[in-house]
């Protein structure tokens, strides 16, 4: 007998590498290549003046951010929840909504944090295979379950599942909470957000990390009917009342006040992505149809891991997952046009 017999053991999620070397072309963690809104910079400057506010606890209700989100998305503030990145929001949502003897369903190829949270919280789950073309089969989610979580567009496949299919899943599972993780929705596809007015079992989760260039600030949110959100708040207030700091609440609010900038950088990323798909095709890659800020690709004749390693030696970081079904694929985050040129040049050398 040892103390190690009585502790909670978990195989953790492995985040993408954050290299210390600033000269790296960093296309490995789906960050936005453009800076956050200049309005965020202004807020940061004013924070240095108002630093005395840090003596006090922040607003546990996160009101300025929740109100700004409710204005931006035209929702009642009671339908809005915020947290420390969508990872925090998703973890709390798993803990809140998945408490059944039946398994939670999610795709076998998806965000690899889902099975980790399920294991951590002792939630049973069943992985539903995506089709051979990596699309999600919506009919496979019409079986008994204790909840459903689907990333849409999915990661790392980059593929978007039509809203009619999402609605079918939500509608036909009235006894389960269905979580739609829309981390990438600003880069393509139609959001399930309007459906929260029709279905009280739907939670839509979003993040500021990708489309709003604020991965470092850690801001995520969830939208659902007020009853669903109230259960989520109860769990949050049972873990940590003060998840978001004063500064972060103001940073997020400032970002929401600059929709013009948001639209501008999002459309730039989409444009670069579409051009990159053509370019990578010319280099012998097949790209899955992307509705995100990354491309999921495989090469006709060259091994994915070898390409990954050769790029890394040239200080170009992309993501390789040594996982079943996708171990010959690479995930490439869309960078600036200049960064993408460096990628194409390196690939030409490596592939020749
Ligand atoms: C990036 C990502 C998240 C987490 O984002 P946060 O930075 O924690 O907001 C959640 N789900 C998916 C599918 C993602 O790709």
Image (cartoon, rainbow, N blue to C red):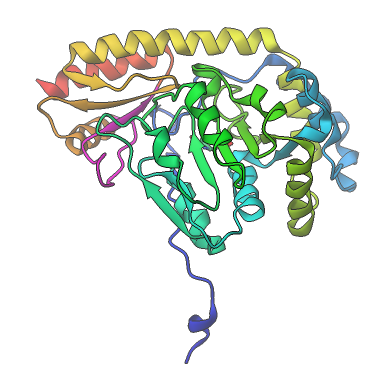
- 241 left or right of 150 in image: right
Percent across and percent down for residue 318 are: 34, 31
Q: Position of residue 306 (x, y in %)?
A: 17, 36
How many labels were placed on the picture? Answer: 0
The quarter of the rendered structure image containing the C terminus is top left
State whether residue 238 is above or below residue 308.
below
Q: Is residue 235 left or right of residue 332?
A: right
Q: Is residue 329 magenta?
A: yes
Quadrant hosting residue 67: top right
Which quadrant holds residue 70? top right
Question: As drawn, which residue projects farthest toward the bottom?
Answer: 1
Main secondary-structure element of the magenta-colored stretch: loop
Span highlighted in magenta in the image: 315-333
Q: Is residue 173 magenta?
A: no
Identify the residue at image location x=46%, y=12%.
270
Name which quarter of the figure residue 244 lies in: top right
Q: Residue at x 42, y 39 (%)?
A: 19
Q: Position of residue 144 (x, y in %)?
A: 48, 51
Look at the image and tell me whether residue 6 can be seen. Answer: yes
Please tell me whether residue 337 is drawn above or below residue 56 in the rendered image.
Answer: above
């Amino acid at each position: 007998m040892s103390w190690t017999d009585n502790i909670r053991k978990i195989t953790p999620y492995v985040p993408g590498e954050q290299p210390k070397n600033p000269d790296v072309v960093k296309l490995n963690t789906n960050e936005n290549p453009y800076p956050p809104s200049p309005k965020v910079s202004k807020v940061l400057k004013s924070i240095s003046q108002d630093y005395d506010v840090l003596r006090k606890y922040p607003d546990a209700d996160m009101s300025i951010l929740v109100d700004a989100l409710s204005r931006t998305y035209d929702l009642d503030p009671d339908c809005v929840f915020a947290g420390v990145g969508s990872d925090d929001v998703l973890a709390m949502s798993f803990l809140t909504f998945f408490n059944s003897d039946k398994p939670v369903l999610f795709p076998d190829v998806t965000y690899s944090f889902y099975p980790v949270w399920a294991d951590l919280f002792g939630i049973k789950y069943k992985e539903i295979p995506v089709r051979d073309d990596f699309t999600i089969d919506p009919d496979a989610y019409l079986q008994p379950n204790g909840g459903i979580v689907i990333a849409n567009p999915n990661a790392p496949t980059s593929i978007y599942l039509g809203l009619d299919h999402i609605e079918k899943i939500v509608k036909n599972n009235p006894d389960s909470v269905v979580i739609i993780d829309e981390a990438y929705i600003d880069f393509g596809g139609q959001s399930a957000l309007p459906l929260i007015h029709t279905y009280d079992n739907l939670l839509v989760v979003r993040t500021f990390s990708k489309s709003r260039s604020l991965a470092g600030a850690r801001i995520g949110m969830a939208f659902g009917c007020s009853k669903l959100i109230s259960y989520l708040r109860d769990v949050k207030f049972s873990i940590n009342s003060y998840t978001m700091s004063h500064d972060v609440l103001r940073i997020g609010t400032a970002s929401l006040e600059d929709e013009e900038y948001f639209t501008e950088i999002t459309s730039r990323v989409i444009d670069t992505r579409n051009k990159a798909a053509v370019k990578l095709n010319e280099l012998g890659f097949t790209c899955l149809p992307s509705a995100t800020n990354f491309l999921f690709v495989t090469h006709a004749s060259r091994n994915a891991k070898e390409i990954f390693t050769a790029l890394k030696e040239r200080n170009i970081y992309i993501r390789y997952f040594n996982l079943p079904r996708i171990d010959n694929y690479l995930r490439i985050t869309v960078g600036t046009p200049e960064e993408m040129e460096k990628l194409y040049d390196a690939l030409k050398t490596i592939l020749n």
